[in-house]
Protein backbone atom coordinates (compact mmCIF):
# COMPACT_ATOMS: atom_id res chain seq x y z
CA UNK A 1 0.00 0.00 0.00
CA UNK A 2 1.46 3.36 -1.05
CA UNK A 3 -0.16 5.09 1.93
CA UNK A 4 1.22 2.76 4.58
CA UNK A 5 2.57 4.70 7.55
CA UNK A 6 0.75 7.91 6.69
CA UNK A 7 -1.71 9.00 9.37
CA UNK A 8 -3.11 12.07 7.66
CA UNK A 9 -3.66 12.98 4.06
CA UNK A 10 -5.00 16.52 3.85
CA UNK A 11 -5.81 19.14 1.27
CA UNK A 12 -6.26 22.90 1.53
CA UNK A 13 -8.88 24.38 -0.77
CA UNK A 14 -11.17 27.33 -1.34
CA UNK A 15 -13.90 24.77 -1.99
CA UNK A 16 -14.77 25.75 -5.56
CA UNK A 17 -14.32 22.22 -6.97
CA UNK A 18 -14.71 20.32 -3.72
CA UNK A 19 -18.15 18.86 -4.44
CA UNK A 20 -16.93 17.31 -7.69
CA UNK A 21 -13.56 16.09 -6.42
CA UNK A 22 -14.32 14.98 -2.87
CA UNK A 23 -15.52 11.41 -3.61
CA UNK A 24 -12.31 10.59 -5.55
CA UNK A 25 -10.10 12.32 -2.98
CA UNK A 26 -11.72 10.42 -0.12
CA UNK A 27 -11.34 7.16 -2.07
CA UNK A 28 -7.64 7.96 -2.50
CA UNK A 29 -7.22 8.25 1.27
CA UNK A 30 -8.02 11.87 2.06
CA UNK A 31 -9.04 12.20 5.70
CA UNK A 32 -8.61 15.91 6.44
CA UNK A 33 -9.58 19.15 4.75
CA UNK A 34 -8.54 22.73 5.42
CA UNK A 35 -11.03 25.08 3.81
CA UNK A 36 -10.03 28.68 3.23
CA UNK A 37 -13.24 30.57 3.84
CA UNK A 38 -12.84 34.27 4.53
CA UNK A 39 -16.46 35.34 4.22
CA UNK A 40 -20.01 34.07 4.46
CA UNK A 41 -21.28 36.76 2.07
CA UNK A 42 -21.68 35.36 -1.49
CA UNK A 43 -20.59 38.58 -3.26
CA UNK A 44 -17.46 38.86 -1.10
CA UNK A 45 -16.77 35.16 -1.66
CA UNK A 46 -16.78 35.69 -5.45
CA UNK A 47 -14.42 38.65 -5.03
CA UNK A 48 -12.00 36.73 -2.81
CA UNK A 49 -11.87 33.56 -4.94
CA UNK A 50 -11.69 35.70 -8.09
CA UNK A 51 -14.44 33.82 -9.89
CA UNK A 52 -17.45 35.76 -11.05
CA UNK A 53 -20.74 33.94 -11.22
CA UNK A 54 -19.70 30.96 -9.13
CA UNK A 55 -22.83 28.99 -8.32
CA UNK A 56 -21.27 27.56 -5.16
CA UNK A 57 -22.19 29.48 -2.04
CA UNK A 58 -19.46 29.99 0.53
CA UNK A 59 -21.47 28.15 3.18
CA UNK A 60 -21.76 25.09 0.95
CA UNK A 61 -17.97 24.75 0.88
CA UNK A 62 -18.10 24.01 4.60
CA UNK A 63 -21.29 22.00 4.78
CA UNK A 64 -20.53 19.46 2.06
CA UNK A 65 -17.43 17.91 3.69
CA UNK A 66 -18.89 18.36 7.19
CA UNK A 67 -21.84 16.20 6.20
CA UNK A 68 -19.53 13.56 4.74
CA UNK A 69 -17.99 13.15 8.22
CA UNK A 70 -14.35 13.31 7.27
CA UNK A 71 -11.89 12.55 10.02
CA UNK A 72 -10.85 16.18 10.41
CA UNK A 73 -12.23 19.42 8.98
CA UNK A 74 -10.80 22.86 9.63
CA UNK A 75 -11.90 26.26 8.34
CA UNK A 76 -9.24 28.95 8.05
CA UNK A 77 -10.59 32.49 8.01
CA UNK A 78 -8.16 35.32 7.29
CA UNK A 79 -9.51 38.43 9.02
CA UNK A 80 -9.07 41.57 6.92
CA UNK A 81 -9.93 45.09 8.02
CA UNK A 82 -12.62 46.61 5.82
CA UNK A 83 -13.57 43.29 4.25
CA UNK A 84 -14.72 40.72 6.79
CA UNK A 85 -13.91 41.76 10.36
CA UNK A 86 -17.63 42.39 10.88
CA UNK A 87 -18.38 38.69 10.21
CA UNK A 88 -16.48 37.06 13.10
CA UNK A 89 -19.56 36.45 15.24
CA UNK A 90 -21.42 35.18 12.16
CA UNK A 91 -18.64 32.62 11.62
CA UNK A 92 -18.87 31.47 15.24
CA UNK A 93 -22.65 31.20 15.03
CA UNK A 94 -22.53 29.39 11.66
CA UNK A 95 -19.94 26.81 12.73
CA UNK A 96 -20.68 26.27 16.43
CA UNK A 97 -22.68 23.07 15.87
CA UNK A 98 -20.66 21.67 12.96
CA UNK A 99 -18.00 18.96 13.40
CA UNK A 100 -15.08 21.24 12.54
CA UNK A 101 -12.54 23.67 13.93
CA UNK A 102 -12.38 27.33 12.91
CA UNK A 103 -9.09 29.20 12.97
CA UNK A 104 -9.08 32.99 12.63
CA UNK A 105 -5.84 34.21 11.07
CA UNK A 106 -4.61 37.80 11.09
CA UNK A 107 -4.06 39.23 7.61
CA UNK A 108 -0.33 39.81 7.14
CA UNK A 109 0.29 41.56 3.83
CA UNK A 110 3.76 41.02 2.47
CA UNK A 111 5.29 42.19 -0.79
CA UNK A 112 8.35 39.96 -0.63
CA UNK A 113 10.49 42.56 1.15
CA UNK A 114 8.45 44.44 3.71
CA UNK A 115 5.28 43.80 5.68
CA UNK A 116 2.77 46.60 5.78
CA UNK A 117 2.49 47.41 9.48
CA UNK A 118 0.76 50.72 8.67
CA UNK A 119 -2.12 48.76 7.12
CA UNK A 120 -2.36 46.33 10.02
CA UNK A 121 -2.03 48.87 12.80
CA UNK A 122 -3.34 52.03 11.19
CA UNK A 123 0.07 53.77 11.34
CA UNK A 124 0.45 56.56 8.82
Image (cartoon, rainbow, N blue to C red):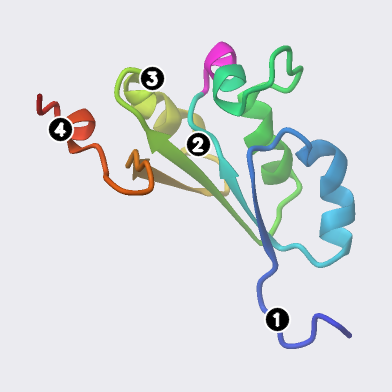
Q: Nearer the viewer, mark 4 or mark 2?
A: 4
Q: Secondary structure at mark 2?
A: helix
* Residue drawn at (62%, 18%) of the image: 46
- How many C-alpha atoms fall within 10 Å of the one at disc 4: few (<14), some, or many (≥20)? few
Quarter of the figure that contains the N terminus:
bottom right
The image's mark for residue 6 is 1
Left or right of 62, for residue 110:
left
The image's mark for residue 121 is 4
Q: Nearer the viewer, mark 3 or mark 2?
A: 3
Q: Secondary structure at mark 4?
A: helix
- Residue marked by disc 2: 95
Prevailing SS of the magenta stretch: helix
* Residue drawn at (48%, 31%) of the image: 38
- Residue marked by disc 3: 83
Q: Is residue 22 magenta?
A: no
Bounds of the magenta span? Answer: 40-44
Mark 1 or mark 4: name the one nearer the start of the chain: 1
Amino acid sequence: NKLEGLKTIAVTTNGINLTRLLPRLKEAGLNAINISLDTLVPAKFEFIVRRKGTSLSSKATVLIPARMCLLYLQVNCVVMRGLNEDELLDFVDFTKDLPLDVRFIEYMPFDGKYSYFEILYGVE
